[in-house]
Image (cartoon, rainbow, N blue to C red):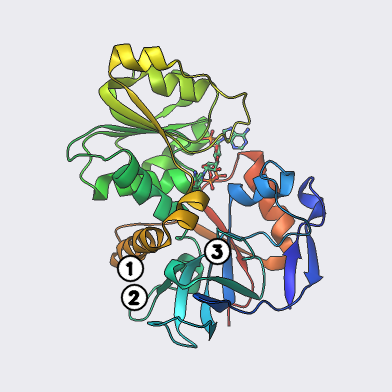
Amino acid sequence: MKAITIPEFGGPDVLRLDEVELPEPGRGQVSIDVAYAGANFAEVLYRQGVVDVPLPFVPGIEVSGRVRALGPGVEGLRVGQPVAALTIVDGGGYAEVVTTSAELVVPLDGHGLGPELAAALPSNSTTAFLVLDRVARIEPGESVLVHAAAGGVGSQLGQAARLLGAGRVVGTVGSPAKIETARSFGYDEVVLRTEVAGSGAFDVVVDMVGGTARRAGLDLLAPMGRMVVMGNASGAEDVGIPANELWFTNRTVSGFNLAAFSAAFPAQAGQALRRAVAAAARGDLRVRVEALPLDRAAEAHRRIESGGSTGKLVLEVAAG
Ligand SMILES: NC(=O)c1ccc[n+]([C@@H]2O[C@H](COP(=O)([O-])OP(=O)(O)OC[C@H]3O[C@@H](n4cnc5c(N)ncnc54)[C@H](OP(=O)(O)O)[C@@H]3O)[C@@H](O)[C@H]2O)c1
């Protein structure tokens, strides 16, 4: 089958369209004929070697498509069924066929969701619900600050906060051109990240940018506030968070990583994906999706790395 491989770590040009062996589902797994594969910051990190994986590696943490085959012990799914799936534990989504745990696969029958949108939900939308609900444990009426609010995951966090009953929801962006885009994703206010000081105190802060954004987020936490650290898109040096400061100010800092969560708690990750699919099907969760053909994966990576992209890029494998 055809797949995009990472034969060596490096820039976008290392991505290659290759012929690779067809994967077969193991116990508890299914294989999926991929329609679209989501393109994410995560795959950029795999390609750069920030996350160490054995090479050659087929990236791709989420897909939409149809169930191709069921591995031993799998029940509740059928061959040919349209699905959205997380392939984040072992990667492999930038391919014609991928295998993943059946617990990370969600049927799409009756939802009326197109495969393009369905491929855009598993990573970012699932993460948004898990981060706010399970990690930050958001309560109705609480205020929320989200960095990089116009991005793939940022655009989902603002809307998920609304759905979970948040009060004031504020987003930050890196440039004025992104303010209107972020506003269209459910944020009450959108401010430039450089001007976020003075935006008030927040019960929940979500940081996936790192560096000065992380420090600013910590300073903006209200007493009993919770900051969730879930990325470092700026590539800045890690920010040391002094534990004594948390002690003196009644603040909490937590971490979230969807790959590790999905490996440890696949049923819960699958349940959160179900929630995201249902919200998108109701029209409560919008994603601005743009599709590129699979063989333009390097261009998708370039755009993600540039920091200029908004919304979500997906790769068309076999839209059929
Ligand atoms: N922990 C998890 O499970 C999890 C799940 C999903 C995503 N993430 C993380 O969340 C972050 C965003 O992911 P995404 O898929 O939403 O990507 P994305 O749509 O490309 O968003 C990334 C955003 O980060 C901001 N940014 C700041 N400095 C940047 C730099 N030097 N290079 C590139 N972008 C920069 C940009 O927004 P501004 O222009 O507004 O600054 C950019 O649009 C990544 O760090 C990713 O690893 C983590």
Q: Residue at x 79, y 47 (%)?
A: 9
Which residue in the structure is indicated by mark 2?
A: 111
Q: Which mark is residue 87?
A: 3
**Disc on the earlier residue, 1 or 3:** 3
Name the secondary structure under disc 1.
helix
Side (left or right) of 166 relative to 111: left
- Report the Cα–Cα distance between label 1 and label 3: 21 Å
Ligand 1 lies in which image quarter? top right
Pick the residue in front: 126 or 258.
258
Q: Residue at x 72, y 61 (%)?
A: 296
**Disc on the earlier residue, 1 or 2:** 2
- Report the Cα–Cα distance between label 1 and label 2: 6 Å
Pick the residue in front: 187 or 119.
119
Q: Hey, what amino acid is under mark 3? A: Thr
Q: Which mark is residue 204?
A: none
Q: Nearer the viewer, mark 3 or mark 2?
A: 3
Pick the residue in front: 111 or 224.
224
State yes or no: discs 1 and 3 in contact (Cβ < 8 Å): no
Question: Badge 2: how crowded within 10 Å, few (<14), some, or many (20+)?
Answer: few
